[in-house]
Amino acid sequence: MKKIAVLGCGTVGSGVVEVFYKNRASIERKAGSKLDIKYLYVHRPHPELPWQDKLCFDFDTIANDPEINIVVEVMGGVHPAFEMVSTCLQNGKSVATANKELIAQKGAELLATAREHHVNILFEASVGGGIPIIRPLHQCLGANEIDDIQGILNGTTNFILTRMIRQGMSFSDALGQAQQLGYAESDPTADVEGIDACRKICILASLAFGKHIYPDWVHCQGISQLTAEDVAYAQDWGGVIKLIARAHRLQDNGGIAITVEPMFVSHESQLSTVDDVFNGILVTGDATGEVLFYGKGAGKLPTASAVISDVIDCAKSTDTIDTLYWEQSDPVKDSGLLCDWSQLPAQYYLRLALQAPSQSALVDELFCSPVLLARKRQPATELAFVAPSMAPATLDALCDRLQQEGISVLGRIRLL
Amino acid sequence: MKKIAVLGCGTVGSGVVEVFYKNRASIERKAGSKLDIKYLYVHRPHPELPWQDKLCFDFDTIANDPEINIVVEVMGGVHPAFEMVSTCLQNGKSVATANKELIAQKGAELLATAREHHVNILFEASVGGGIPIIRPLHQCLGANEIDDIQGILNGTTNFILTRMIRQGMSFSDALGQAQQLGYAESDPTADVEGIDACRKICILASLAFGKHIYPDWVHCQGISQLTAEDVAYAQDWGGVIKLIARAHRLQDNGGIAITVEPMFVSHESQLSTVDDVFNGILVTGDATGEVLFYGKGAGKLPTASAVISDVIDCAKSTDTIDTLYWEQSDPVKDSGLLCDWSQLPAQYYLRLALQAPSQSALVDELFCSPVLLARKRQPATELAFVAPSMAPATLDALCDRLQQEGISVLGRIRLL
């Protein structure tokens, strides 16, 4: 019999307990041993929970109980999760966590601690909720060098964008609807500003490229500045706007580029059809080509099921799973691991407000007479087009020039 | 150092050798041991191959070489692959195979032999080529009861259907184009009649439901009878025709139903956007909901990369991986494991040729005045509609009745 402690009993925590007892027989069969949940660690009494006999308010009891083999961490946040998970690993307990913030900040350190103590820290649920992605990336695609990962990794922003695209809603109306439906929190910053997606792409990139990538190295931009006009122009261009988290290896020098930003995605990309709260992750391996993983990226039961798949692996493993590993890096000194995105040439959609139609001559001069995009009821002084490929820093200079002439840049979105 | 023998050196076999030597360093790192290919088993000299020093014409040399830990079987066909793989397992060698025919016919037997000898038989490449599906199904979705698997599992038929949908081609023209491009073999029967897809869904169903499912238990129908007219009506209905291999658990009695047949797939299904030679597999688990796996279902390098991910697992495992298992069943006596599809109610699209427009009264009577589908240049005596849900056997009786009245059934396709 292997015993489990669950740290945290919010949505995901209670989902873990529910799914465990619902499918216990088949989970035990797959784990190859009897399993039970002994403790549910909580901060305060929860009289509404059905598992009163398992509630535990003292972490040390769990950390020092030799009966506990596996710890599930679903509290969220870096502290005190980091200290608790470290202690558990040091005490010879394997840990399954859904905590993307923890892994994005402390992943390499925790993986090293786990290896040192011959246990595991697994985190399938930290990216993509119930979509299998961590394990396929290091196991199934193990024969590949990963060249590119493009992900729609945040369900809240994808829901908002889908409403903006399908119903022509403004950002704030769509956000309001997401909040009403429980898809967005009352403080939606981490979602709409891309912070959540950034943590997740850093986890995937660390795994794919073997070095810890810190979120604050990454150029990260959210969707709060997007307008219904930009969405309409994207349609005219032949695609949709999606918040894309991307990590890829540059073909010329092998450098790594990571960005999180809204992008124009062509209808030809499988990612363009990933709608509502769904997530999609498109991985390109040198041998296998493009593989897409798609499903619900969040939610109680999908996330719980991913945590439990990790519990099963913790129960089965007799030592650290050594394909799941990346090296530590220094949060400051190693930031040069990533290419400077402002120097990487890319194509951008631009939307400009002229003061007079005659100013279009300057636009033609600066951007080589671009083909204009059109939509219904477009003001005569509005120009929208895709600029020739150039480094963002170069584009910044051109936009400064426009603004000097009184031309406002209303929209600027990169093409995937 | 662990040594590998590759049985068969066709497209996939030579792909395995290529990918192995290209990414050898990272493959060895993931496997946790040094690896090399010692033998390439072939029937006759292959002077064109660059690996002349590894060619071996005698299977017994391989079977009896204690240095060989891992055998890759990529010959195809049930015999002599079954005898060779069995011998290897009995001699304590793990096997990675891409052979779907072998696993669909002999999977349970080989899994039992592997378990008895504490080695592995792995077959990630047998379904979905380079798409990770076998391992996610038994590992990542291990906390789920699998309720439904819907797959586009055959790239050749999907290419043909995509040409019929996009260019309005006839089946035979599209098949001709597929053959020209090397996507279809000169004898395309196994692909176009659904036999290949049937083997693959049987492998997935055996794994999901725990009992060996034989292909000849399954209602299997190909795409060779489809017409451009049916494709046009599907569009009017709001979807596309896809060859769908489906295994699902019935909600009322828990019985298992498996079918391979062309189906009307709504544009709302993610499967409707799986085009060309790509494969897509939509798995529904009770906790995780719908998860889609998408990618190239065939081809030299994708398939080779899946085989090598199995080689890595063979190298790492110290005993049989026990989540990858299903029980044997009797090919004749146990056929009742599957529900009789002819008794399961379903909705069908029907296309009828009347002898006179007045006969539509009989159609209205038999099918409760269905809403008609329309397309351009439709003959006045042609009726197309979706019939009310009924068992296929009941529908057979109604179709017989129509034919007695001189009404021909030109098309009959199930709705997904």
Image (cartoon, coloured by chain):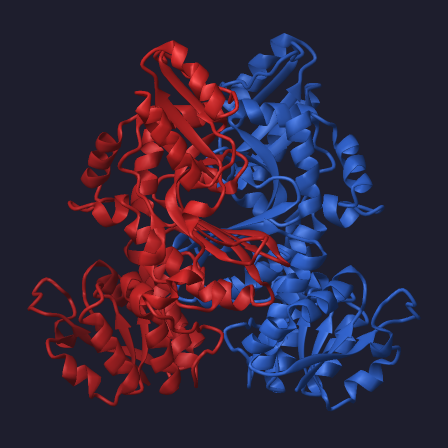
Chain colours: A red, B blue
Picture coordinates of residue B228, whole percent (x, y): 69, 25
The structure residue drawn at horizontal position 73% and vertical position 82%, both measured from the top left corner, is B88
Which residue shows up at 9% across the image and 65% down it?
A: A46
Residue nearest the viewer, comparing B41 with A361: A361
Residue A236 left/right relative to A87:
right
Q: How many marks?
A: 0
Residue at image point 71% right, 88% down? B91
Q: Is residue B291 above or below residue B409?
A: below
Which corner quadrant of the image does residue B356 belong to? top right
Q: Quadrant of residue B236?
A: top right
Instruction: Decide: is B35 above or below B146.
Output: below
Q: Nearer the viewer, residue B216 or A409?
A: A409
Image location of residue B392, percent across then percent down: 58, 38
Indicate the position of residue B111 as horizontal and vertical percent values: 62, 76
Q: Where the N terminus of chain B falls, by quadrant?
A: bottom right
**Vertical placement of B174 versus A253: above or below?**
above
Residue B363: x percent and y percent?
57, 19
**Could you tell me if residue A298 is visible in this image?**
no
Closer-to-camera residue (A14/B54): B54
Decide if residue A35 is in sight here. yes
